[in-house]
Amino acid sequence: MANSLFRSGMIVSAMTMISRVLGLVRDAVVANLLGANASADVFLFANRIPNFLRRLFAEGAFAQAFVPVLSEIKEQEGDDAVRLFVARAAGTLGTILLIVTILGVIGSPIIAALFGAGWFVDWYHGSGDGDKFILAAELLKWTFPYLFFVSLVALSGAILNVYNRFAVAAFTPVLLNVSIIGCAIFLHQQFDVGAYALAIGVFVGGVVQLAFQLPFLYRAKMLVRPQWGWQDKRVKQVRTLMIPALFGVSVSQINLFLDTVIASFLVTGSIAWLYYADRLIEFPLGLFGIGIATVILPTLSKLHAGDKSSDFQVTLDWGVRFVIFLGLPAMVGLMLISPLIITVLFDHGAFSSSEHDHVNAVALGVAAYSVGLVSFMLIKVLAPGFYARQDTRTPVRIGIIAMVLNMVFNLMLAPFIGYLGLALATAMSATCNAFMLYRGLAKEGVYHFSAFSVGFTFKCVLASAVMGAVVYLFQAQFDWQSWALLEQIALLGSLISSAALCYFGVLFLTGVRPSTIKSVATAESQ
């Protein structure tokens, strides 16, 4: 089981890397087309709303409630029962999503007013950023239907993951990035405001992603005719688990969205700066944290259904160690070289033609978010420890506390340091969230951080510190801001290579060998 988990995790991480790299290319295209001006603020706002709902309901609450129930049915009742459950879950979810989507498109001005309150106030008074409110309402009519398609994509991806077909779901987001990039390149000249082309790309991306997954569902014999199943006992079970799960694993998304609302009252560019900073954080988070969480939830659900508590502890400990192993150096690296990364990726076209120093503004946001990077990852791994056991009450209590803390931190910091306060507050509340999740698992006797993990974590901290010192000294020798793009890319490659060699070199000197790294994933050495 352990080797299978490690292999599956590597497959998901590899597919996710392709998606994240293309995501950065997409963001570079957006930065080049829109920069960090008012149009960028509005598109990112209009795109964040359906993505927030998608993460909250589909990939967040629904997936965390759906996968344990589906795994239990598969283990105890067989594939025929799974197909019936999938049909009723798909029919119920699809119908509700269709209604919500129609209402969202019709009511886009209301949504824009609710979540872009600062823009709406200016529009109402006929001053300031009132044009942003009008543009946001129009773009939402294109981006909001993405919720319908991508939620069904999340449903089909969860089914494929339970049947150990992780690569398909992990690769699917690539198609969204390709769609947005394609529409940005070929359609932006058709509109006075380039943000319309990007919004159309979001819509097309949702359709293409769903169409891509259907053949794989057919091959898995899980492409069934949807049925309305609101009163089905298993659908009821998912509903019961889903309602409190809304405040569990998706708390970080709620916090980010609240940041967007507050940022609409701040200086123009704040939303874009936070967005680009968040995108850089999402790269390692998606690559390692979400990748491992994707494969660990079905496994934990299966172990719980089989009453294998010791294997449950070992598997969860593996997940925690794995994100620490890769999260710590990613955190240090982003803090140090994010200005160079931002310059290479985004500092072109409209992004660079402004009175604002966008590179420095985004880099500071990255540094603030990076404080909580490991915590973001730990939440993704620890939360399944509750959901796999169909316990959604504890995460909801923790989620509410973390959300309140985030708002308190926002009010404490944002008045003094603006958008940086929002990013730092998100990182701080995530750290509190991760700690409370671990404490909850420990109190219930489900999971304790092992002695092996403590020792390995200390080695990772030491290696990350040495790596950071070397990268800082190496980078300080060059005045790369005035260099050509190809020279900056070469330096970035050298810094990343040097950082990796230093990190793994220090681990080797502290006694970590390739076999030890594998044992970090398999927990065989415990």
Image (cartoon, rainbow, N blue to C red):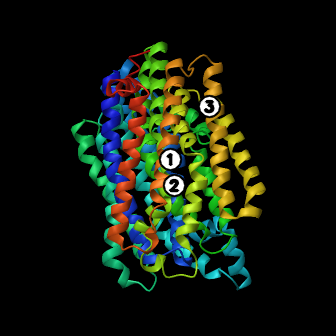
Report helix, strand or loop for mark 2.
Answer: helix
In this view of the protein, which residue sits in the foreground, 292 or 153? 292
Identify the residue position indicated by label 1 in the image.
Answer: 468
**Residue mark closest to the camera, 3 vs 2:** 2
Task: Measure the C-alpha gap from mark 3 to mark 1.
Answer: 29 Å
Q: Is residue 106 left or right of residue 404?
A: left
Task: Measure the C-alpha gap from mark 3 to mark 2.
Answer: 29 Å
Residue type indicated by callout 1: Gly
Identify the residue position indicated by label 2 in the image.
Answer: 336
Q: Quadrant of the N terminus?
A: top left
Is there a contact, CB below 8 Å, between mark 1 and mark 2?
yes
Q: Is residue 230 left or right of residue 400?
A: left
Is there a contact, CB below 8 Å, between mark 3 and mark 2?
no
Among numbered discs 3 and 2, the one appearing first in the sequence:
2
Number of numbered callouts drawn: 3
x and y percent of residue 47 in the render?
50, 64
The answer to whether one can see residue 166 in this image is no
Residue 437 is marked as 3
